[in-house]
């Protein structure tokens, strides 16, 4: 692994600091003076067409960003990740999510083990299981086929599967439905099991260690719901034997803790494993995606993996000056560290991607929300940014005002597809064309704005001219694809994985641990007795926590 470099000591950082100080953004002028700007700043990666031309950069800035990537050792660290070196230093682990999508027949030996061969052994087991459920061969305890799959997980074991399921709904087998439970709030289990027939419901419990508090609590509540409903329907009696049989028919696991899986009542043969070199937020293409393999089918899941691999190959092989994930990651560094942007909007003009921004929140902010570097020293720059967004024209009628005319710089990624899943017309009008007209118009408006003279030319009263001026020079990246296929969804995920990696490499942080989520979980276990009424535990808390718990205890209505 390459030596850790302080980015602020590099010649490129010094040059970028000078370029930022001298920057006078003028996208109108830049486009007017440079007929080739759009072509020169547009790139392809697999099926993705990416237009960077409306960003606040010129050739000199882009070249300096590429030089920064070179000077911090981006390519060497990327190669170390792909090779299985233990770049996750705080957990002493390899980072090999890219191995999850390498094609069968490839080989990558790490610590004496061919990890690609292992991946495909698990995939074949998942695909065989998916075929059994999809064909009706796998039956519930009453002999009926499965109609609903409920995935129980949290974090990466939920955000990835639910996002992809929503994105690829047109590919879901008719007659099958997936639901997703994550929140420990009992309302989540209640609502996700509401209206279901337990005899045709299959639960997938996703927890690598099978100890995750939220997931196991929800799994036990789901188990209780299923057994009670089956007993009420007369499908099983009150015996332990019939309960055990029902659990075996209606629960499978994504876990490597086979002893705990068995203790829960799940047949270890129906557990699908993955490895410690797969981080939760990088795991949707592992066994964590079992619900997707069932819903979409093995062929579509294989296409999904192939999309990831296409971007992995691009990131591994394309020179930095044409490497789309690297360029987008370096642009984010430009905005965060030199232009002081603190957030980043992701705006998909594709309704099926309505959970994509939420998925990216974990990927990016859990990865790069760090205050110490790989060697344990404090960071020397700002790190991370707040990712957020909503789909399509919904956002236009909500927060676009802030992006267009607010005082904050908010870089935004716009995502669209050329061919919709449902080409519907409104009379003679193609509604998708109307939809994409908004996509094209928004990036144009953000880039070029509207001058006071243009506002006056429309007959606007002088006193309200300032309110109707758009300054422009609001940076956007446009990402387009032919259609929202399984492959394209995989490509989009991999694109942002490698963007995140690029930023983390520049900042010198470990993008693959998440110690920040631990403290609150530990304290919750300590506070739980106080919430349950233990006076001694309550007295040990700080004054604010005591008051809040006291309010809860005084107002909890237990019926």
Image: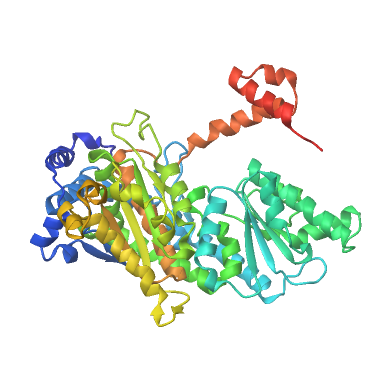
In the image, 508: left or right of 486?
left
**What colouring does the structure picture have?**
rainbow
Q: Residue at coordinates 74% horizontally, 19% vertically from top-left?
A: 535
Residue at 38% across / 57% down in the picture? 396
Q: Quadrant of residue 349?
A: bottom left
Is residue 323 in view from this perspective? Answer: no
- Look at 24% across and 44% down and name the residue there: 334
Give the farthest residue toward the left: 33
Q: Is residue 73 above or below residue 534?
A: below
| Residue at image point 59% right, 62% down | 290
List x then y, in percent, for residue 170.
53, 73
Task: Give 44 or 420, whichever is nearer the viewer.
Answer: 420
379 up-or-down from 333: above or below: above
Residue 423 position, x and y percent, is 45, 78
197, above or below 388, in the image: below
Q: Is residue 182 left or right of residue 74?
A: right
- Identify which residue, 428 or 46, lies in the foreground: 428
Residue 472 position (above or below residue 480): above
Q: Horizontal and vertical percent for residue 184? A: 65, 44
Q: Considering the image in quadrants, where does the N terminus appear?
A: top left
**332 or 445, which lies in front?**
445
Q: From the viewer's side, name the closer residue of 246 and 233.
A: 233
Determine whether, in the image, residue 352 is placed left or right of residue 474.
right
Q: Which of the image's four quarters has the C terminus? A: top right
């Amino acid at each position: 692994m390459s030596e850790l470099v302080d980015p602020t000591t590099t010649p490129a950082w010094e040059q970028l600091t000078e370029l930022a100080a001298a920057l006078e953004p003028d996208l109108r002028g830049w486009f007017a003076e440079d007929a080739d700007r759009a072509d020169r700043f547009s790139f392809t990666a697999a099926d993705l067409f990416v237009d960077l031309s409306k960003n606040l950069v010129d050739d000199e800035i882009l070249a300096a960003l590429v030089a920064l990537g070179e000077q911090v050792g981006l390519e060497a660290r990327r190669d170390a990740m792909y090779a299985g070196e233990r770049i996750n230093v705080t957990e002493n682990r390899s980072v090999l999510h890219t191995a999850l999508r390498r094609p069968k027949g490839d080989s990558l030996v790490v610590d004496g083990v061919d990890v690609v061969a292992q991946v495909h052994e698990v995939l074949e087991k998942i695909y065989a299981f998916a075929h059994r459920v999809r064909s009706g061969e796998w039956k519930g305890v009453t002999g009926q086929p499965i109609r609903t799959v409920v995935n129980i997980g949290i974090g990466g074991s939920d955000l990835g599967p639910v996002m992809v399921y929503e994105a690829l709904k047109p590919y879901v087998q008719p007659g099958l439905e997936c639901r997703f439970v994550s929140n420990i709030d009992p309302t989540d289990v209640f609502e996700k099991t509401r209206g279901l027939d337990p005899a045709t419901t299959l639960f997938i419990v996703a927890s690598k260690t099978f100890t995750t508090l939220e997931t196991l609590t929800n799994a036990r509540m789901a188990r209780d719901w299923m057994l009670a409903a089956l007993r009420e329907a007369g499908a099983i009696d009150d015996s332990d034997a019939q309960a055990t049989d029902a659990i075996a028919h209606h629960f499978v696991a994504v876990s490597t803790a086979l002893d705990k899986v068995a203790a829960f009542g799940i047949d270890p043969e129906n557990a699908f494993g993955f490895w410690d070199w797969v981080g939760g937020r990088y795991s949707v293409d592992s066994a964590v995606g079992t619900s997707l393999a069932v819903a979409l089918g093995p062929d579509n899941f294989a296409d999904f993996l192939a999309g990831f691999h296409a971007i992995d190959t691009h990131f591994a092989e394309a020179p930095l000056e044409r490497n789309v994930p690297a360029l987008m990651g370096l642009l984010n560094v430009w905005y965060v560290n030199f232009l002081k942007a603190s957030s980043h909007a992701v705006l998909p003009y594709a309704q099926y991607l309505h959970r994509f921004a939420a998925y990216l929140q974990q990927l990016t902010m859990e990865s790069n929300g760090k205050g110490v570097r790989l060697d344990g020293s404090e960071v020397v720059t700002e790190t991370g940014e707040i990712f957020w967004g909503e789909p399509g024209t919904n956002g236009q009628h909500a927060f676009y005002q802030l992006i267009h005319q607010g005082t904050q710089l908010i870089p935004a990624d716009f995502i669209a597809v050329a061919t919709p899943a449902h080409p519907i017309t409104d009379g003679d009008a193609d509604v998708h064309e109307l939809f994409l007209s908004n996509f094209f118009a928004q990036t144009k408006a953000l880039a070029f704005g509207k001058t006071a003279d243009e506002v006056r030319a429309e007959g606007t009263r002088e006193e309200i001219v300032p309110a109707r001026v758009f300054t422009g020079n609001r940076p956007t990246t446009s990402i387009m694809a032919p259609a929202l296929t399984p492959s394209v969804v995989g490509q989009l995920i991999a694109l942002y994985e490698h963007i995140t990696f690029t930023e983390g490499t520049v900042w010198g942080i470990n993008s693959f641990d998440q110690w920040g989520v631990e403290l609150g979980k530990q304290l919750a276990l300590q506070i739980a007795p106080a919430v349950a009424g233990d006076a001694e535990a309550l007295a040990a808390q700080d004054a604010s926590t005591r008051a809040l718990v006291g309010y809860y205890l005084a107002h909890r209505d237990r019926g």
